[in-house]
Structures are given as C-alpha cells and as structure tokens.
C-alpha cells in the first residue's frame, strides 16, 4: 500500500479519514470511531448539518429539489459516516418514514423502489427501528423481480427487467438493514444474493443481450453518486457485502484501474448537474473520495482485506 497516499488521505476531511482508518489500515474500532465522531463538528459534515432547519428539513421538500432536499442531504451525511445516533439525523429520517417519501402522486400515489431503498438505507443507519421500517423492508422484498433486480417502473408499467440504478439503491438499503441487525436479516441476505447475481450477470454495467454499456455515465465515478449507479459504487457495494470477488467483475475493476493517475491517486469526476449546498471537491487535483474508495475496492479484489 502506498503510505504517502494513505497519509494524504488522512490529512483530508474526517468523513474520509475515519474510513481510511477502518477500511485501509484496520485500525482499532475505538480509534476510527474517535475520528468518525469528528464528522459532527468538523468539515463537510458539520457544514451540511448547519444547513438543516429547525423543522428537521433541508429545504421545504423532503425529496426535491435535487440535490439539496432532506433525502439527498441525509444520503450525503450517511456516506460521510455521520454517527448513527446523531439526534438531528435520526429525527429527519423519521420525517421520511412518516411521510413515506417513496410514494409519489396525490390522487393515486405510485411506489418508487429506488427511493424506498434510500429510506431503508437511512432508517437502518440512523437507528430508526420500528414498524415503519419493517413495513418498508417487506414492500421492498415483495417487489423484487424474477431476474433478481428492482425497477422503479415495474409498478407503473409492469416492467419485468431490473434497473441498474434502482437495484443498486435497493441493495445498499438491504445491506444497511442486515448490518443494523434487522429481524429479517436472513431473508434480506438471500434477496441481496439474487441482486448481486443480477449485477454479476451484467458485468456490473453492461447489457446482458448486447454486451454494450447502456449509459456511459456508469463508467464514471462521481461522488456522491446520487441516485445513479456506476462501477465504483457497485464494486464498493460488493466489498461492503463481503462478497467473494467474481471474475465477471474484472471488466469494471480494469476500468477503475485505468483511471489511476501516475501519482497513484484517482481523479475527480464531474458530478451530476444541479444545485448543491457546497462542493466537497473540485478542480484538477486528485480526489480523496475516489482514491479512498478505489483503494479499498482493490484491496478487497486482491484479497488483502
């Protein structure tokens, strides 16, 4: 491991540093948790928390506007690793459950699996464990398609093929549910395994019919990923799930390796358009977010973790 690059990562925001300690350095839990606790009071985490209104919301909308709504602000704090018991984040997550943010439309609401996945990720990370979360995970399991994936359009159009974007949003939610000790963890783990097979059969981002990439943006590595699937996000999920490296994922691993700079770091990739509270990284300098995530994915792939 490149110690110079690791030291450079540790010099960054606490949101990155604690994950470096846990996932690259195998630090003692007490040590990385001490760094993680700083996310509340320093850097990007503290800055984003400061934008939260007394109502518990970021902006007036729970899901829109993107990317400054309550949902997307909480998702960013989750990826930063804001501690699970943060009272402000827990209270705001409960708003999403109360309002069933994954239901859209007034007269005849339709169910959106991708947003349900967000709800499960957030309610599992920010320690909301009650009947609302149990109903949510049940609905998600009920909507899994025969190919192992999920699709936001399946309720509205009857689509039978999983969507890359939707399936990744749901799988991350299921993973957090298992890690949180949810009562249906065994059932959820089986659904996850089917979802991983869906992705492996597609080499993570290719059509199973033509082998082509249906959306070239999936070969990029923006952070945060918002609702979009991409190769690094997908590989990082497989790592977090403790899955064995699958040779069908060699293609996206090679793409990630191809982005590595001569200095051993990874570049910033242009993010999705839309208003944000602030940019975490910008310019032509290397990205700490992408470097940390790529290094831990490659560590998993090489079997050294």
Image (cartoon, grey):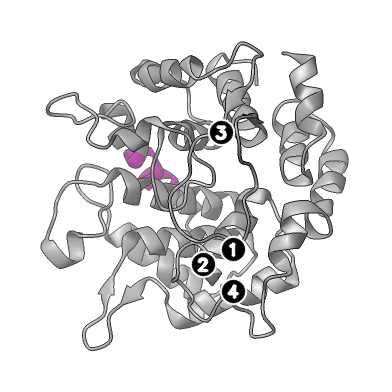
Contact between labelled residues 1 and 2, with CB atoms less than 8 Å apart: yes
**Is residue 192 a member of the stretch shown in magenta?**
yes
Q: Earlier in the sequence, mark 1 or mark 3?
A: 1
User: Residue 255 at what x, y percent from top left?
Assistant: 42, 19
Seen from the viewer's position, the closer of residues 148 and 94 is 94
Q: CA distance from mark 2 to mark 3?
A: 24 Å
Residue 203 visible in this rendered orientation of the protein: yes
User: Residue at 73% of width from left, 46% of height from top?
Assistant: 15
User: Residue 170 at what x, y percent from top left?
Assistant: 40, 52
Looking at the rendered structure, which numbered label has been put on residue 74? Answer: 1
Q: CA distance from mark 2 to mark 1?
A: 5 Å
Residue identifier under label 2: 71
Q: CA distance from mark 3 to mark 4?
A: 26 Å
Tell me if residue 102 comes above or below residue 228 in the rendering.
below
Which stretch is magenta? 189-195
Looking at the rendered structure, which numbered label has been put on residue 268? Answer: 3
Quarter-of-image position of residue 168: top left
Contact between labelled residues 1 and 4, with CB atoms less than 8 Å apart: yes
Seen from the viewer's position, the closer of residues 280 and 294 is 280
Query: Mark 3, residues whose alpha carbon is within 10 Å: few (<14), some, or many (≥20)?
Result: many
Query: Mark 2, residues whose alpha carbon is within 10 Å: few (<14), some, or many (≥20)?
Result: many
Helix, strand or loop for disc 1: helix
User: Residue 171 at what x, y percent from top left?
Assistant: 42, 47
Residue identifier under label 4: 58
């Amino acid at each position: 491991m490149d110690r110079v690059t690791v030291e450079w990562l540790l010099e960054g925001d606490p949101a990155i540093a604690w994950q470096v300690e846990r996932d690259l350095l195998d630090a003692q839990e007490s040590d990385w948790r001490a760094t993680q606790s700083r996310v509340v009071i320093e850097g990007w985490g503290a800055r984003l928390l400061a934008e939260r209104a007394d109502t518990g919301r970021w902006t007036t909308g729970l899901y829109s506007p993107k990317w400054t709504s309550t949902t997307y602000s909480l998702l960013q704090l989750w990826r930063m690793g804001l501690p699970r018991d943060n009272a402000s984040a827990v209270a705001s997550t409960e708003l999403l459950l109360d309002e069933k943010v994954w239901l859209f439309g007034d007269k005849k609401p339709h169910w959106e699996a991708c947003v349900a996945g967000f709800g499960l990720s957030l309610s599992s990370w920010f320690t909301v464990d009650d009947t609302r979360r149990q109903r949510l995970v049940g609905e998600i399991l009920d909507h899994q398609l025969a190919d192992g994936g999920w699709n936001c359009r399946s309720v509205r159009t009857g689509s039978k093929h999983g969507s890359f974007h939707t399936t990744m949003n749901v799988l991350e939610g299921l993973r957090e549910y298992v890690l949180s000790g949810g009562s249906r963890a065994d059932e959820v783990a089986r659904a996850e395994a089917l979802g991983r097979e869906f992705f492996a059969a597609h080499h993570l981002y290719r059509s199973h019919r033509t082998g082509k990439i249906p959306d070239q943006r999936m070969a990029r590595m923006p952070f945060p990923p918002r609702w979009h699937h991409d190769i690094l996000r997908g590989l990082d999920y497989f790592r977090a799930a403790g899955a064995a490296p699958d040779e069908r994922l060699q293609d996206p691993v090679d793409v990630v390796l191809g982005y590595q700079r001569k200095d051993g770091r990874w570049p910033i990739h242009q993010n999705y358009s839309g208003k944000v509270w602030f940019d975490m990284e910008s310019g032509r300098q290397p990205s700490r977010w992408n470097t940390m995530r790529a290094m831990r994915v490659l560590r998993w792939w090489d079997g050294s973790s």
